[in-house]
């Protein structure tokens, strides 16, 4: 039995019709980002301890590709495939969030006051 | 800007082909469970404070419909539409997990020793 997971990553892979003013994470490469998380975690032997899941709309469309890491509730925005290795190594494994990719409200939550 | 959410619910809505020995949450009514969570949260004015998302396979197929609540990381199994009101009222709003629906490892995690 695998869960509970030490860290659980959810990547919004929601797709909206072309031309929707909100845009969507799927059109910005969300599936590729999710796959990259899975591959990086597998490579590091984290299978069963950490998991990267697809999720429906995370209600942060303007910041897509949107990613949230639980249990800490850290929100990343504009995530690209080339950012994934850094998030996995620095945050998921070493516990230090990647500041430059945090969504504004997640930045604030981590630096109160 | 809605997140971070006070509580964030993920419902596995993964669908496997008919006859797959693992079964899948979708065939057990996962979409209806997800919709029920959304409606119960809306009814209680929780929009923007709590969110129910669809998720890909949560790797707990034998316990489906699988639901995990973060940030606490509480795992529910065999969730049916008629259980949703109780989870929303007792756990999400009042903070007391619904013992009878916890997955075995989540039960243990909440009662150490």
Image (cartoon, coloured by chain):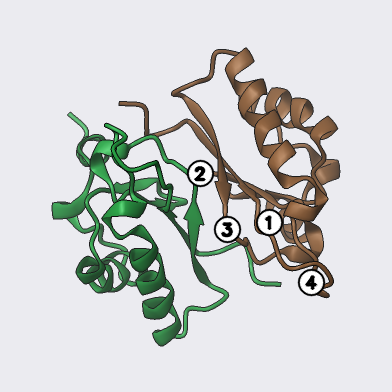
Chain colours: A green, B brown
Q: Is residue A94 left or right of residue A108?
A: right
Q: Residue B22 — which label?
A: 4
Q: Which residue is mark 2?
A: B71
Where is residue B104? Give x, y as percent: 79, 59
Q: Disc 1 and disc 2: Cα gap in Å? A: 14 Å
Q: Disc 4 and disc 3: Cα gap in Å? A: 15 Å
| Earlier-in-chain disc, 4 versus 1 | 4
Q: Nearer the viewer, mark 2 or mark 3?
A: 3
Q: Nearer the viewer, mark 1 or mark 2?
A: 2
| Camera-nearest residue between B5 and B106 | B5
| Camera-nearest residue between A109 and A85 | A85
Toward the front, the furthest residue is A18
Say what secondary structure mark 2 lies in.
loop
Q: Are there few (<14), some (14-19), or many (20+) residues within 10 Å of tag 4?
A: few
| Earlier-in-chain disc, 4 versus 3 | 4
The structure residue drawn at horizontal position 78% and vertical position 51%, both measured from the top left corner, is B77
Say what secondary structure mark 4 lies in.
loop
Q: Is residue B79 left or right of residue B75?
A: right
Q: Which residue is mark 3?
A: B56
Q: Is residue B77 left or right of residue A113?
A: right
Q: Which residue is mark 1?
A: B109
Q: Are marks 2 and 3 in contact (CB under 8 Å)?
A: no
Q: Chain of mark 2?
A: B
Toward the left, the furthest residue is A100
Where is residue B46? Give x, y as percent: 53, 19
Q: Is residue B92 left or right of residue A28?
A: right
Q: Disc 3 and disc 1: Cα gap in Å? A: 23 Å
Q: Chain of mark 3?
A: B
A42 over B17 or under it: above or below: below
Q: Quadrant of residue B22?
A: bottom right
Q: Disc 2 and disc 3: Cα gap in Å? A: 18 Å
Residue A100 seen by the camera: yes
């Amino acid at each position: 039995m695998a869960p509970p997971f030490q860290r659980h990553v959810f990547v919004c892979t929601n797709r909206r019709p072309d031309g929707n003013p909100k845009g969507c994470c799927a059109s910005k490469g969300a599936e590729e980002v999710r796959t990259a998380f899975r591959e990086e975690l597998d490579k590091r032997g984290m299978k069963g301890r950490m998991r990267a899941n697809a999720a429906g709309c995370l209600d942060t469309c303007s910041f897509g590709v949107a990613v949230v890491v639980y249990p800490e509730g850290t929100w990343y925005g504009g995530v690209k495939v080339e950012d994934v290795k850094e998030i996995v190594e620095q945050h998921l494994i070493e516990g230090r969030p990647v500041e430059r990719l945090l969504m504004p409200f997640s930045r604030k939550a981590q630096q109160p006051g």
